[in-house]
Amino acid sequence: MYFVEDGVETHNLIEDNLGMVNHATFALFASDAHVSTYWITHPNNIVRRNRAGGSEFYGFWYELVMDLTAPSYNKGTCPYGETLGVFDNNIAHSNERFGLRIFDWFPREDPCKSGSKAIPTTMKNF
């Protein structure tokens, strides 16, 4: 349905959309087997007043990736190190798994360098 896939896209305005009844497929990529209505791989985007209903898996899925491989890859891009843009007044209903899934995100002191250590739980502010 709606996706910001490469992990380098920022400041996109995804607003006032309706997505519904999407189904998984096993004919394309492995990621297509776990569908979402809105699939976002970089947190610094504006997502507001959208509706997601009837997905076989997720309504809204933030999947932040460390290893960017897309054609638009830029060494200076690190989705894990970015702040969340706007996620406001979105509605997800009748999805078979989750309305909102934030997958594989672990706060780190310096998330874009190898060997960075996790932030102690007392320091998490989210």
Image (cartoon, rainbow, N blue to C red):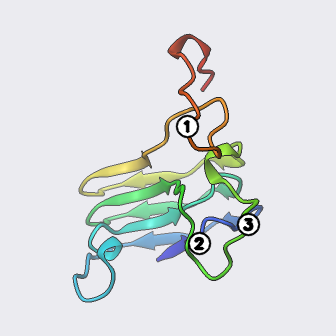
Residue for badge 3: 12
Q: CA distance from mark 3 to mark 1?
A: 31 Å
Task: Choose the circle earlier in sequence order: 2 or 1.
Answer: 2
Kind of residue at disc 1: Gly
Residue 107: give x, y in percent of width and height. 56, 32
Question: Is label 2 in a helix, a strand or a loop?
Answer: loop
Which quarter of the picture shows residue 68? bottom right
Is 123 left or right of 83, judged from the image as shown? left
- Position of 42 with respect to 121 (left or right) is right
The kind of residue tagged 2 is: Asp
Q: Nearer the viewer, mark 2 or mark 1?
A: 1
Q: Quadrant of residue 12?
A: bottom right
User: Badge 1, how many Cα within 10 Å: few under 14, some, many 20+?
Assistant: few
According to the picture, the residue beneath numbered tag 1 turns out to be 115
Please indicate whether residue 67 sits to the left or right of residue 44 in the image: left
Q: CA distance from mark 2 to mark 1?
A: 24 Å
Image point (71%, 59%), residue name: 77
Q: Nearer the viewer, residue 46 or 102?
A: 102
Q: Could you say which quadrant of the image residue 53 lies in?
A: bottom left
Quadrant in which the C terminus is drawn:
top right
Q: Please state which of residues 13 and 110 is positioned toward the viewer in this rendering.
A: 110
Which of label 3 and label 1 is nearer to you? 1
Measured from the top left, where is residue 99 in percent x and y? 38, 50
Q: Which residue is mark 2?
A: 6
The residue drawn where x is 32% and y is 66% is: 55
90 relative to 106, above or below: below
Kind of residue indicated by mark 3: Asn
